[in-house]
Structures are given as C-alpha cells and as structure tokens.
C-alpha cells in the first residue's frame, strides 16, 4: 500500500508515493544543508540554486533544514513577529496580535507570488499558509481569553514560522518539477514527551531517541527527492525554547545530520565563512579556511554567530565535519570545522596543526580570531559580612544566579569580592537601580527583569557596583596559554589606545583570553588588536561588508 505523505495540501506527492519502496540505506550518502531565515527570505532563488546544484553533483542526497523566513533582518522576521504576537495576546483587550498574523500572511503571499511561477502551486501554498496561521490565531485567542500561556502553546506558535518556510521552499521546488517533501518535526516524540517531566535533564538518551525518530520520519515520508525539514523540533522537556533558546534550528540541523549519518553538515549564510575579525569593522579581516571545534565553540560563545554552541557536540561526536558556506557565492569552499581525532590511549585531543608552517603538530604561533560580545553588564559584588567564608559567599552568589536565570559570560573572584559579566537582554520592563561610582549615585536602566530581580537579591548580602554598556573582547585560538607574550601584547595594545580594562579572564580555557572594556570603544579596540596581533598578510582579504547582521557570518 502506498505511503501517504503530507505536502502542501495534505496529500502524498505522486513522485514520493510511487517511489516509496526502497530504504534510506540504499541511497547515496547525505549532505545536510541548513539555511537561515534571511537567506530564505531575501535570496530564495540563491537557496534553490545551492540545493539543486548540490543535488545534481550526484555524490550525495541533500536534506534541507529551514529557519523561519526573514525578509530584511531577524528583528522583522517571522519568528520575531510571532513572539510579538504572543506578547500582544497576553495583554487584556489587545487585538494587535491579529494584525501581526495578517502581516506574516501577506509577506508569505507576496513572496510566493514573486518567486513561484505556477499558479496552481501558488494557490495550494496560499491555502496551506492560511491553514497554519488559522491554528496560530486560534491558540492566541485562547491565550488572551485565559491569560495563560503554556510552554507547549509557545512552542507551537513559534514552530509555525519554520513550517511556513518549509512549505514555501517545497512549493518552489515543485514548481520546477523537483521532488520535495515538507517534513514537520514539531510533533517529534509527541508520545515520548508526554511521559517526560518538564524538569527532566536533557541527556544522551533523549537525543538518541530524537535522531532515531528523525531518521524514521525521513525514511517514511521521503524515500526519494529532497526532504525540506522544519528547524523546530518537538520532544524537549519543558519545550524547545526553554531548553535551547533561539538558534534551535542549528541544533536541529545537527541532529538531522547525525540521524542520517551525513558526510557533511553545511550551514549556509550570506558571507563566505568565518573571518578572523568583524569584516564590517576591520577592513583587513581575512577568511579562515578551517578552525577547530573548540575555536568555533569559543567564537560562538564570545559574539561571533558561527553556529549554536550546542550544535558542535553532536556532530563532532559523530565525526561529521561542518562547513560554513555562502548562498551568494556557492563556489567558495567556505570555512570547515573538522572533528578532532582523540588519542585512543591517552584520551585527549591531539595538538592543533600550526597554521603558519602547515606541517607539524606544534601549537600555532598566533591567535585565530578576535571577537566582541556587546550589551554586557558587569556586577561587582562585595560582601558586608567579613566573617562569611569565601565558599559560603560564593554559594550565595550562585544561588541567586541560578534562581534568576542569569547567564554568566565571565567571572572573577577574591575572598570578599566577586565580579560577574552578564548579558542584558532587551525589550523588558525598565527597572531603575543605583550605581555607586566615586561616591556619586546615578540611575542605571536595567531592561532585563531577571537581572533587575537578581540585583535586589544581591543587595541583601552585599554592595553591588554596576558597570553598564560594556563589552567582552576576546582573542580566540587553540593553545593560547602556550603562546608566550600574547597576553602582554593584547593588554598593551588596549592600554596604548587608551582603552581601560574592567575585567580579565584567562585560565579556564586554553582557547581564549578575554577582557571587559567600554562598549563604545570596541571598534577602536578591534582595529588596533587586529593590526598588532594579526599582522601576517592574509591569503584572502575582504573589503567591508555592507549591511547584514552578525559580524562574522551575517544573520
């Protein structure tokens, strides 16, 4: 009996149904391609060309993972609009969420009419879009009536952005007579997650169950052709947004790659790969042909939008390389993140290759990149109780951090004083707090409710000094601790350019040296550090990149 496959109108595509007799194991090896929302929104024909070009090589099947569309930027993209719709639905009497949903529908309709040339397929796509957004509107109306929003409701609403994106791409391929199937992973492990407590730890067994189910879904729904897979997946305890946060589509792509035993995971952006500095700020920034997993993870953590940090672990353990590529320049090799081979006897990773001599396993003689993380707030907390032990004091600090969900980027401590660098999120209610600086008091606006609440808790057992509008500038590179003189050069460059350092961090990782500086001086610091520490002439130098967001890769 033919397998029925959900496509635009809920009926199996003839091509997939007719060919649903062989298994995935009989197919060529897979390449998984993940496309961001701005790529799909602004350059859909480029995305189409990249996918079809890879498929025509014949060496591997292509599986595509999609983020929600963004016509201009993430701030005005579908996911951000859906978050705003949720916010409006929680306001008693507000009907603005209806206008937001109407805008999302209009944008997808206009994109379909502009890009897809077959009237019948466009009409089917319109019906599918309206059906998905009708479900969203129904949930939002229930949220407003009950003034209750569950994590399940939030996840469902946000997940429809990825579903609309996949429906759009599927229709585009069908208009070109290319077999493609939309695969919605929102209800992945639906029965499993019902038996899981929201507080349950996300562990290896859960991810194994997810990858097994993804493989089964693709095997069941698309024996041949291109599976177009939602970057939002279900099955996470407490919901995906709570467990992973924004950037979940990178993790989904990694799990798809693992589930298919892919030969490569490709993350497609709008620039050529990972640069050793922000090319919009540093004209001489150069493209990195390869970086290690640890370097990629540090770059992601300290401001460069390389890849979601949790993505790295899954694909590297499966020995799957990641390649960052450009939809505008698909012929460029991009930047490759290669799995590091472990020593089977000593159980540690081999030393990185010297990028400057190209042959030995000696440590590199210079850092790989310099990165910046903006919107930081530094909290200097000094205990009032001199009899309190350091261990007890730190325990109190970290109890507050956990209770209020603060995400610490850097920490420095002494017996009586702890300094924390935390990132302040935007768009929350403003809460005024006092900052004690040189015996003068001023009002600092903290826009993050969690941070504002934490400050009140800290104030009960310590004096809190706040430094707002700060930034972390970091040198990244394997084995930095063994690069004699690098720290001295780093700090001297900042001092020579009249840039004060508020915090310093090195030691927990051999892959970064970080300092906290004033946010308004980051451009000056980037240029000076790049000129002094990356003075070797790069193989490829790029001019400033106009527009875009996410200074390594675009967003």
Image: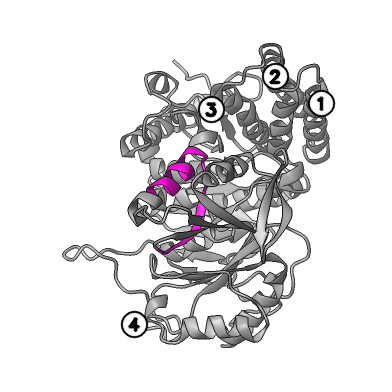
Of the image marks 4 and 3, the number of the one nearer the N terminus: 3
Of the image marks 1 and 4, the number of the one nearer the N terminus: 1
Q: Secondary structure at mark 2?
A: helix
Query: In the rendered image, which quarter is residue 352 located in?
Result: bottom left
Q: Which residue is mark 2?
A: 140
Establish if 66 lies above or below 82: below
Of the image marks 2 and 3, the number of the one nearer the N terminus: 2
Q: Which residue is mark 3?
A: 186
Q: Which residue is mark 1?
A: 102
Density class for disc 2 (Cα within 10 Å; few <14, some 14-19, many ≥20) is many
How far apart, in angstroms, are the residues tagged by discs 1 and 4?
58 Å
Label pair 4/2, CB-CB below 8 angstroms = no
Query: Magenta part of the protein: which range?
Result: 395-414
Q: Position of residue 509 (x, y in %)?
A: 39, 66
Establish if 275 lies above or below 147: below
Establish if 102 lies above or below 529: above
Q: Nearer the viewer, residue 458 or 45?
A: 458
* Image position of 89 (left or right of 191): right
How far apart, in angstroms, are the residues tagged by discs 4 and 2?
58 Å
Q: Which mark is residue 362?
A: 4
Q: Nearer the viewer, mark 2 or mark 3?
A: 2
Q: Secondary structure at mark 3?
A: loop
Query: Residue at 67% across / 49% down in the picture?
Result: 47
Residue 397 included in the magenta stretch of the image: yes
């Amino acid at each position: 009996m033919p397998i029925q496959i959900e496509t635009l109108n809920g009926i199996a595509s003839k091509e997939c149904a007719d060919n649903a007799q062989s298994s995935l194991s009989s197919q060529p090896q897979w390449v998984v391609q993940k496309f961001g929302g701005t790529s799909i929104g602004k350059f859909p024909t480029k995305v189409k060309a990249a996918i079809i070009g890879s498929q025509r090589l014949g060496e591997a099947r292509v599986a595509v993972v999609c983020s929600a569309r963004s016509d201009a930027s993430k701030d005005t993209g579908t996911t951000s609009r859906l978050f705003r719709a949720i916010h409006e639905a929680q306001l008693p009497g507000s009907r603005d969420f209806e206008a937001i949903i109407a805008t999302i529908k209009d944008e997808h309709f206009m994109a379909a009419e502009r890009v897809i040339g077959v009237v019948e397929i466009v009409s089917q796509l319109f019906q599918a879009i309206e059906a998905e957004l009708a479900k969203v509107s129904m949930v939002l109306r229930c949220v407003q009536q009950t003034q209750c929003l569950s994590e399940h409701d939030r996840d469902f609403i946000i997940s429809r952005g990825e579903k609309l994106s996949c429906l759009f791409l599927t229709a585009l391929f069908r208009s070109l007579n290319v077999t493609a199937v939309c695969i919605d992973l929102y209800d992945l492990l639906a029965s499993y997650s019902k038996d899981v407590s929201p507080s349950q730890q996300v562990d290896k067994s859960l991810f194994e169950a997810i990858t097994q189910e993804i493989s089964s879904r693709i095997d069941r729904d698309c024996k041949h052709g291109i599976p177009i897979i939602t970057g939002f997946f279900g099955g996470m305890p407490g919901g995906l947004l709570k467990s992973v946060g924004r950037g979940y589509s990178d993790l989904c792509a990694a799990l798809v790659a693992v589930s298919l035993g892919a030969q490569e995971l490709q993350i497609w952006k709008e620039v050529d790969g990972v640069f050793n500095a922000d090319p919009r700020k540093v004209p001489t920034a150069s493209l990195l042909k390869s970086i290690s997993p640890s370097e990629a993870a540090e770059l992601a953590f300290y401001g460069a939008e390389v890849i979601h940090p949790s993505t790295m672990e899954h694909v590297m353990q499966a020995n799957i390389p990641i390649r960052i590529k450009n939809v505008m320049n698909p012929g460029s090799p991009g930047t490759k993140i290669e799995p590091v081979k472990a020593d089977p006897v000593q159980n540690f990773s081999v030393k990185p290759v010297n990028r400057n001599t190209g042959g030995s396993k000696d440590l590199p003689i210079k850092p790989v990149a310099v990165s910046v993380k903006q919107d930081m707030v530094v909290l200097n907390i000094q205990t009032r109780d001199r009899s309190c032990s350091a261990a007890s004091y730190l325990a109190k600090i970290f109890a507050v951090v956990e209770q209020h969900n603060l995400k610490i980027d850097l920490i420095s401590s002494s017996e009586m004083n702890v300094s924390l660098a935390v990132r302040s999120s935007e768009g929350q209610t403003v809460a005024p707090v006092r900052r004690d600086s040189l015996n003068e008091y001023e009002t600092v606006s903290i826009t993050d409710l969690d941070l504002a609440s934490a400050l009140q808790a800290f104030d009960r057992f310590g004096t809190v000094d706040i430094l707002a509008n700060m930034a972390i500038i970091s040198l990244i590179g394997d084995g930095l601790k063994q690069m004699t003189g690098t720290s001295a050069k780093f700090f001297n460059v900042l001092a020579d350019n009249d840039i004060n350092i508020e915090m310093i961090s090195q030691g927990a990782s051999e892959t970064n040296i970080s300092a906290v500086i004033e946010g308004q001086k980051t451009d000056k610091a980037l240029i000076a550090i790049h000129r002094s520490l990356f003075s070797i002439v790069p193989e490829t130098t790029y001019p400033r990149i106009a527009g875009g967001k996410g200074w390594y890769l675009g967003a």
